[in-house]
Image: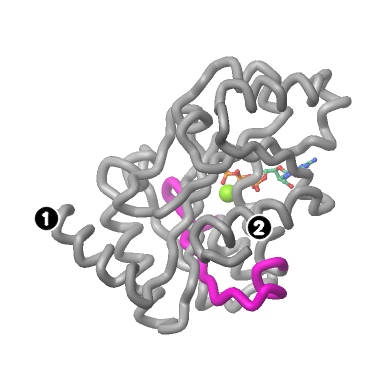
Amino acid sequence: MLHSLRTSDHEIRSGAGAARVGIGGPVGSGKTALIEALIPVLQRRGIDFAVVTNDLVTREDAERLRRSGLIDPARVSAVEAGACPHTVIREDPTLNIAAGDELEARFPGLELILFESGGDNLASTFSLDLVDWWIFVIDVAGGDDIPRKRGPGMLRCDLLIVNKIDLAPHVGVDLDRMLAEARQVRGAKAVVPTNLKNGVGVEAVADAISAAVLFRV
Ligand SMILES: Nc1nc2c(ncn2[C@@H]2O[C@H](COP(=O)(O)OP(=O)(O)OP(=O)(O)O)[C@@H](O)[C@H]2O)c(=O)[nH]1
Ligand SMILES: [Mg+2]
């Protein structure tokens, strides 16, 4: 069932469908803040996009984005993930696939859909039935030992963001060492440091998305 869904989904996407990008990571690492920072950058670049948020039992993040004034509220959809946020992005992403399909039907020119996972732990990963490419957001306040813990989310994502770099001196984190360890465990895969309070790193994230799934450089 999922297979046939995926097959038709792929066929749509390989034609005029929107690219789908996941944003996962632990609770509070800055996933919604990343979307808020990306919105004006993507708009300036003329990219036609929409957002799907996942919360446990509320629509808090969707409401935050709709109220932000940054984006047409109709372009923000919410999925209520229930108790296990990873289930709806990995084991059974049907609800998220349907939310993406529904946005594509309403906005025929859509090029990109960002899917924010509910805050989870270092093990959360996205199914490639749902997304073409995905980002994992960790933050320095979560501890500089996170890269050494080698969680699957951090290892397997296409782009790792180390956020809240502004907080490093306040939480006793050696940022250079944390970044070096993250790069070491990820081999050739990208790591981008960000401060989403002042926008440092956001253009680099938009560049990576554009190059990877929109084939723009
Ligand atoms: N100092 C600092 N604070 C940040 C940064 N990015 C996000 N925050 C703050 O961190 C808190 C959590 O950010 P969110 O974007 O809500 O995190 P989230 O990952 O979406 O959280 P959940 O959806 O609940 O898992 C908020 O208070 C943000 O303002 C940053 O780069 N620096
Ligand atoms: Mg959020």
N-term mark: 2 or 1: 1
| x then y, percent, for residue 149 | 55, 16
| x then y, percent, for residue 197 | 80, 49
Q: Is 43 on the left-hand or right-hand side of 96?
A: right
Which stretch is magenta?
41-60
Q: Say whether residue 50 is magenta.
A: yes
Q: Secondary structure at mark 1?
A: loop
The quarter of the picture where residue 68 lies is bottom right
User: Between residues 34 and 77, which one lies in front from this camera angle?
Assistant: 34
- The CB of the residue at mark 2 lies under 8 Å from ligand 1: no
Residue beneath disc 2: 207
Q: Is 163 on the left-hand or right-hand side of 105?
A: right
| x then y, percent, for residue 138 | 62, 34
The N terminus sits in image quarter: bottom left
For badge 2, the amino acid type reads Asp
* Farthest residue, direction left: 1
- The CB of the residue at mark 1 lies under 8 Å from ligand 1: no
Q: Is residue 28 visible?
A: no
Q: Around disc 2, counting alpha carbons within 10 Å, would you say few (fewer than 14), some (14 to 19), or many (20 or more)?
A: some
Up the image or down, 104 lies above or below 127; here it is: below
Up the image or down, 17 lies above or below 145; here it is: below
Residue beneath disc 1: 1
| x then y, percent, for residue 28 | 62, 39
Residue located 52% across and 55% down the image: 212
